[in-house]
Image (cartoon, rainbow, N blue to C red):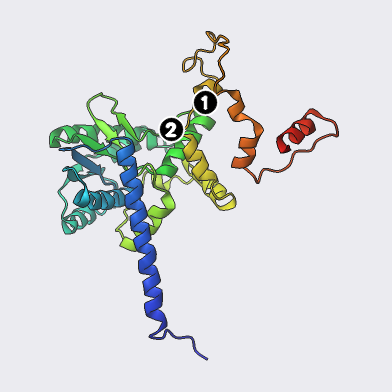
Amino acid sequence: MSAVWTDEVAPSANLKIERETHKLEKRLCREVGRAIVDYNMIEEGDKVMVCVSGGKDSYAMLDILLKLKARAPIHFDLIAVNLDQKQPGFPEEVLPKYLSELGVAFHIENQDTYSIVKRVIPEGKTTCGLCSRLRRGILYRVADALGATKVALGHHRDDMLQTFFLNMFFAGKLKSMPPKLVSDDGRHIVIRPLAYVAEKDLVRWAQHRELPIIPCTLCGSQENLKRKQVGEMLRDWDKKHPGRVENMFTALQNVVPSHLLDGTRHDFKGLKATGVADDEGDKAFDAPNFYALAPSLPALPMRPGSLAQSALRIVQV
C-alpha cells in the first residue's frame, strides 16, 4: 500500500500550520508590545533606527515593529539600517532587495571594519569585542545623521541570559543586557524590543517567513566562543527542566540587593535593628519557596537526628 497525500488530509495539515503560525505571530507581537510598554521604549514622534544585520533576530524585530506600527495608538517612524562591514563574500544585494520589497525606508552604511578586525586581532582569537565597538560607534554616528531618536537592537531573551552567565562565570559580575539604556556617548537611547522573546520562537518565525539569512563570517566562524557554550548550556536546561529558563529570566526582574553581597547597593555596615517586621525579610527566602520553584531537585542524604532532617520535618508540617 503506497503512502500518498489525499485531498482530505492536506487541507487539515495546512490549517494546523496556519493556526500555529498565527499563534506564533500573536505571541511575538504580544511579547514585543509588552516590552515596549514596560520600559517605555517607543514614544510619540520617535524615529526608530532598526539595526538589521541579516540575521534572524533583526529580521524578526523589523517584521514585528512594522506590524505594531500599523496598529499602535501613537505615531512613530521606522528606518532600517544595515552596516556593510565588507566581509569577503558578503551578498550586498540581498538586504537592499529585501527591504525594498518590504516597502520600508532603509539606509546601507558601507564601512570596512572587517579589515581592521582581521589586522588587529590575532588569528583564532575572539573578534566580537573589537567588532562590536567599531560597529557601535558607526551606528551611533549614522543615528545622528538620520535624526533617529531611538536605536533598536535585535537581542532577545536568551541573549540576555547568556550575557548574565558570561559575566558571572568569566567576569565576576552580576550583569546582563538592559532592555533600554543610554549609549556610551550619552547621546542616544538604545532599546531591545525582543527582550521578552525566546530564541526558539525567532527560529520558527524565520522558517515561516523564509528570511534571507546572511551568515556572519567573523564571529559566526568561531565555534568555541564562550557565548556558544553558555547558549548550549541554556538549551540543554530548557530541554531537561522545562520552565527553568523562564524562572531565570524572571529572576533578572526581581533583584533583592539586601540578600546579595554588594555593599555599594545595600548599606550592610549601617544596618540596625528596627523592631519592625519586614515581609520582604529573610523569611521570604525560607526552604518552602525553593521547593516550590524547583520540585525536581534531588533529595540530599541526611543522617537521622541531623539538623537538616529536623528542618525538613518543620517544612513538611
Secondary structure of the residue carrying numbered label 2: loop
Q: Which mark is residue 176?
A: 2
Residue 260 x %, y %: 54, 23
**Disc 1 packing (10 Å; few <14; some 14–19; many ≥20):** few
Residue under label 1: 172
Label annotation for residue 79: none
Q: Is residue 259 left or right of residue 53?
A: right
Say which of 239 and 268 sits in front: 268
Residue 55 at least partly seen: no
Instruction: Determine the CA span between mark 2 and mark 1.
Output: 12 Å
Up the image or down, 212 lies above or below 40; here it is: below
Give the image location of residue 111, x and y in percent: 22, 39
Closer to the eye: label 2 or 1:
2
Give, as a three-letter code, the residue at label 2: Ser
Residue 198 visible in rendering: yes
The three-letter code of the residue at mark 1 reads: Gly
